[in-house]
Image (spheres, rainbow, N blue to C red):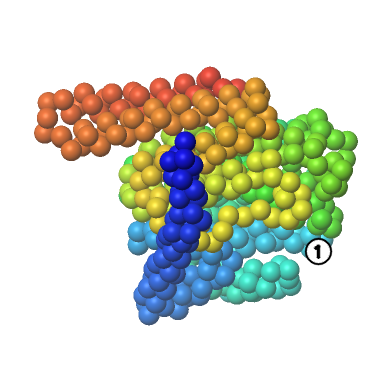
Amino acid sequence: FFFVRFREAIMTVLQNTVFGWMDASSKAVAMVRAKLHQRRVFKSIKSKDAELAFCYEKLTQVSRSFAGVIMALDDQVRDAICIFYLVLRGLDTIEDDMSVPLDIKVPELAAFYEKLEQPGWNIKGIGKSNPHEQELLEHFDVVISAYSKLPPHLQEPIADITKRMGDGMVEYVQRTEEIQTIAAYEKYCHYVAGLVGHGLSRIFAASGLEAPSLAEELDIANSMGLFLQKVNIIRDYLEDIVEEPPRMFWPKEIWSQYTDDFHAFKQVEDREAALDCLNHMVMDALKHIPDCMAYMMALQDPTVFQFCAIPQVMAIATLQSLYNNGKVFEGVVKISKGSACQLMMDTASMPALLKHFRRFMVDLLATARQVQPDTEIVATLEELLEANSKLQEAEQAKMYALRTSKSSLSWMLMTYCAGLTASAIQGIKEAIFPAVEAPAA
């Protein structure tokens, strides 16, 4: 008895001192490594092309998180992805600026893709709440010039997705009521994030880094975007609701089950209902995980894999921190920069991705069992963890098969892996999630 207590005391001390120091140290090292890599890439670009240097400088200013993963990409697609991101960020800045009258905003959104073929075009006075985004639009002619230097097969998906996203934004900025149904919520997320998944898949395939078939996997590419966007929408409740006019992206079909007034969730006295609604929104986001895993397992290039994997890991980490967290209604819940950098440096393979998803889903399940025992989210997470185990088993068998590639059993192992992977993903989707139709491409 005394030995057990003594051991527990020692482990507590180690956890709070040595292990805690080691964890903080590894996060600091990850942050330094990420920063040094970005500087090396930027220095190389700056010495070759002033316009691209401007694009990467703006990229680091408007999105530090995406800048890191974009700069780690292969040279064949890095510039195209950087420009693709900046084009869509410019479009999003126009859509986000609530001070721009609709009679100006709507035509700008609808025709934004055409500006890519208009050398020298820029626009002033939009995005004043974020100086970096305002500067991006004020110097958009530099982005257009960099875009014009891309090969036509990489320009085409950028222009097409920009047009389709602009059309979708026009539809939503003109709506006179909040998002009513889950279907409408899915459609909005498709326009602003699912289409990004479509565009990236087409760029990866067109570059030759990924198989041509990836450009046809639009349903699972859509889910990749929807998972990220839904996490952002859940996290940004307070930031959106205090806008003038308020921005309400949580579907009424969900929140009306818990309140008659969506704004009431800000009030402490309505916190219990707010948390129940928040947990419902988290449950809704979880349904995209099987498709995300299917997409990730289809990737071949290691830099493309890491580019796609890092945002997904960040999303599941954020989702775990959002679940049943009342701070969502008081501010913005974020994972620390150190933790983010550590995840970025440690998500280079499918086994690592599965390990991280498992860790955060286990933590989420532990909380769910305490606050929502015997509910759908508990059953869902248990099924997802079972599928995760099967996918890890498939990955281990595949790695063994590759190591014994000369063996007559190799082809049998690879066939087993493919079947196990497909059945795990399809089984989990059929078992716990209703069919979700992707918006028309």
The one of 179 and 313 positioned closer to us in this rendering? 313
Query: Label 1 crowding class (10 Å Cα cut-off): few <14, some 14-19, many 20+?
Result: some
For image coordinates 15% across by 34% down, the residue present is: 404
Relative to 99, residue 253 above or below = above
Report x, y in % for residue 431.
53, 19
Q: Is residue 57 visible?
A: yes
Relative placement, left or right, of 177 versus 70 is: right
Relative placement, left or right, of 33 versus 407 is: right
Residue assigned mark 1: 99
Report x, y in % for residue 222.
54, 39
Relative placement, left or right, of 181 versus 28 is: right
- Mark 1 belongs to which amino acid? Ser
Q: How many marks?
A: 1
The one of 66 and 357 positioned closer to us in this rendering? 357
Relative to 14, residue 298 above or below = above
Report x, y in % for residue 85.
53, 59
For image coordinates 40% across by 22% down, the residue present is: 423
The one of 313 and 187 positioned closer to us in this rendering? 313
Q: Which residue appears farthest toward the front when viewing the image?
A: 2
For image coordinates 12% across by 26% down, the residue present is: 408
Report x, y in % for residue 250.
74, 41
Relative to 196, residue 286 above or below = above
The one of 105 and 59 positioned closer to us in this rendering? 59
Q: Is residue 156 visible?
A: no
User: In what element is the residue under mark 1?
Assistant: loop
For image coordinates 72% across by 49% down, the residue present is: 328
Q: Quadrant of the C terminus?
A: top right
